Every structure is written in C-alpha cells, then in structure tokens.
Image: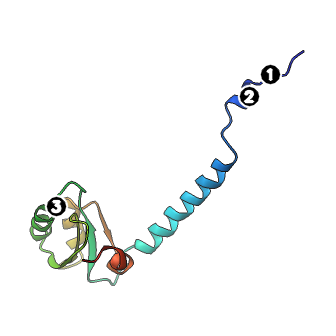
Amino acid sequence: MGHNSSNSACRWPVWLNAAVLLLSSWIIVAALSFQVRPDTEIVAVIFPPWWSTQQALEAAASANAAFVRATAIPAILVVRPDNEAGLARLREAGAWLAIDPRAVAACLTL
C-alpha cells in the first residue's frame, strides 16, 4: 500500500503562518494608534483615494469642518469638525475614516 500524498498538496507553507501573524499584528497596532481620541478637536479624514484635493475640500466644507492643512496624499485632509456630530457629517459627506492626525503627521505632511 502506498502513501497518499493528496493531504500534503492542500497544505500551505509553514512560513505563511508567521507572515499572517505578522500582518495581523501590524494591522491591530495601526488601528489602535490611528484611533481618534474622544477629546481630539482636530482629525485627519480619509476620503476615497480617487478624489482630488478639490473634491475632498468641498466635502469637508459641506460638513462644516474647518480646513487645517493638506497632506501629501490629496484625499487625506486635516480638519476641525465644528462639534461632536461633525464626524458623522464628515462620514455622510464621503469620508471613509477619521484618524488621529498626530499618528500620520510624520509621513503625510507637505
């Protein structure tokens, strides 16, 4: 009787386990460090990447958010929402995500 090798053909490489663990831990650390703190007055908002700076500025203005500065990526703006419902209005205007601007300031400043 021969050894059935069909089981070994379905397995993935051992190094892939470590790669998945590394990637998932990086995503968790990034999610925790980019979180907007409750007392934050200024946030960085991410609009769809295909939007121009003009479209992102118009969307932020329609949500009554004051423009603070632009970043190296046109679809990411640093703004000051006018009150606590400002983040909800930014999401309604098209923002995908609101993050802490200090977490990305070193990488995305002009």
Depicted 6 relative to depicted 62: above or below: above
Closest to the observer: 87 or 33?
33
Give the quadrant of residue 62: bottom left
Q: CA distance from mark 2 to mark 1?
A: 7 Å
Residue 7: numbered disc: 2
Which one is earlier in the sequence, the residue at label 1 or at label 3?
1
**Could you tell me which quadrant the N terminus lies in?**
top right
Kind of element beneath mark 1: loop
- Mark 2 and mark 1 in contact? Answer it, CB < 8 Å: yes
Question: Which residue type carries mark 2?
Answer: Asn
Estimate how packed mark 1 is, as few (under 14), some (14 to 19) or many (20 or more) residues with alpha carbons within 10 Å.
few
The residue where tag 1 is placed is 4
What distance separates the C-alpha of mark 1 from that of mark 3?
Answer: 58 Å
Discs 1/3, front: 1
Q: Quadrant of the C terminus?
A: bottom left
Q: Amino acid at mark 3?
A: Ala
The x and y percentages for residue 13 are 67, 42
Q: Residue at x 28, y 73 (%)?
A: 44
In the picture, the disc for residue 93 is 3
Mark 2 vs mark 3, foreground winner is 2
Tell me the quarter of the picture where residue 89 sits.
Answer: bottom left
Within-10-Å neighbours for mark 2: few <14, some 14–19, many 20+: few
For marks 2 and 3, the one nearer the N-term is: 2
